[in-house]
Amino acid sequence: MLESEILILTGINIILIIYFILEPLLMWEEVEEE
Amino acid sequence: MVAWDHVIIIGLYFTAMIVIAIYGGRISRDIKDYFMGGGRLGSWVGAFTYQATNVSASALLGAIGLVWFAGPAPEIWITIAFTIGIGLSFKYVLPKVRSISEDVNAVTIPELFESRFDNSSSVRMVSTLLIIIFLIPLLVGQYVGIGLMFEMILGIPFNWALIIVGTIITVKVAYGGFMGVALTDFVQGWFILALAIIMPIIMIGNAGGWSEMISVFHEEAGSAALSFWGTWGPMTTIGVFASILMGCFGIPHTVIRFFSMKKGAEKRALPIAMGFYILLLPLMFFAGMAARIIFPGLAANPDLALPMAAVELLPSVISSLLLAAILAGLMSTIDSIVIVGSSSFTRDIYKGSINPDASDKKQTRIGRLLTIVVGIVAMIYAMTEPGLIIELMAMSWGLFGVTYSLVLLGGLFWKRMNKEGALTALIFGGAVYIFGMQVWAPFGLHPVLFSLMVTLPAMIIVTKLTPKSSEESISKFFKG
């Protein structure tokens, strides 16, 4: 099995990326609603 | 032996790129279009040209080589730094830079600095010199990557490869300008994504499947390679993390892409750029591990793992297209650096000091000529000392991270920042960084961290001790 430390790092990375994908998309809709 | 089957398909690919670039040149209307796309890029082309520029020799060849010998952790740290750096700069730096560069009519980053810091020609000159001195080695590093790939994989001698590819890229940039670069980046971006999706699957399969790959890699590389810091250890990893993170805010050939986006495109560009990045992760994390099992004897040149795998594991038509995708990654970085170099020469040196009244047409002509000069200088440079240049490539990232990034972030978000502070970051920051790299840094610190620790306080103190920037300069950057 892959060492858990690497999995933790990869998880952090993916969470960050998803945050940066979703955050502007959600914000963008708000702006449009205005 | 020259591998003609690959050469022919790659030749066709190059021809298509030149046609697209020339189309880009034809739809360019003025000097702003030629040098920075004149604020005309939409979110898709904008995000793709940014990411294709970022995905350079270091991501497609270097990253895989790094995982091959140091394990996946350092590369994962590097991608975390990129994620944060790209995310924050798209979110906070892009919208400001986009609208300000439009308001103050800036075509280059030194021009933006100049208008923020009381029209200071010294800030502009010093920042231009930094681009010219430290961007060319980065360019040369990409050329060396291409030369090695051609020599080892296609059987074309290193110098010939440089001449052929160098000429193609130079002609493409000279006639296509920034619009040509952006459009070809968009097409090349899709090639890179195809490569990133296909190769990890094929390579992990060839390494015997997921669990087999992990256990053999563990045996081959040792348990340190599968630990939190990899075989790099914490000091190096944290230092590289810092230089990538800081570099994201200031590397000129990517930041210039913020000048070129259309109003409103910036919000959609971030999810697209990040979506692009997430698709690259499996390639960067796992291809190197698989390569260690498929090509155990690659220690002398692990950087070539990816092109070798493409050639050995796939039928020749597909592998040629994948080789073209790797070249796409390198070429889209080279063309972006060339255009930043030639725009700096033209706008900041030629128009700034030699001939201030030059018309747009004349500047475009000079820009084209200088593109050819920059292309030739880099080609010749690449033929001489590739070893040293790889070192200089890493140096460029850190250097812009402690100079340009501090000036740009300070200029955009700190009203009090003035030209003396900017010059401190550019000159002192750069000098401390180079000293830390070449001579000595305390406690074995990475030179980027050393320079940041000294330069940031110095910049703040010098700024506080010297007069504020004029209201006129500040008002352009801070509205309301």
Image (cartoon, coloured by chain):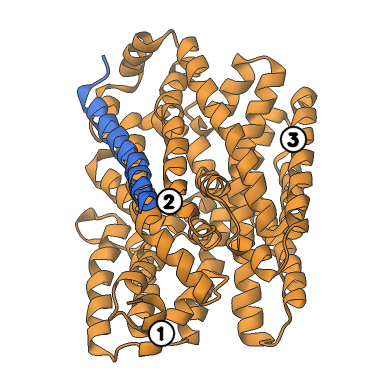
> Circle 2 marks a residue in which chain?
B
Label located before the other in sequence (1 or 3): 3
Q: Nearer the viewer, mark 2 or mark 1?
A: 2
Q: Give the numbered dot on residue B312.
A: none
> Circle 3 marks a residue in which chain?
B
- Give the quarter of the image for residue B465: bottom left
Vertical position of residue B116 compared to residue B188: above or below: below
Residues B229 and B172: in front is: B172
Vertical position of residue B184 compared to residue B41: above or below: above
Residue at (63%, 27%) from the top-left corner? Answer: B322
Tell me if B40 is positioned left or right of B103 in this view. Answer: right
Disc 2 target residue: B267
Q: Give the numbered dot on residue B473.
A: 1
Q: Give the numbered dot on residue B13.
A: 3
SS at circle 1: helix
Residues B52 and B132: in front is: B52
The quadrant in which the C terminus of chain B is found is bottom left
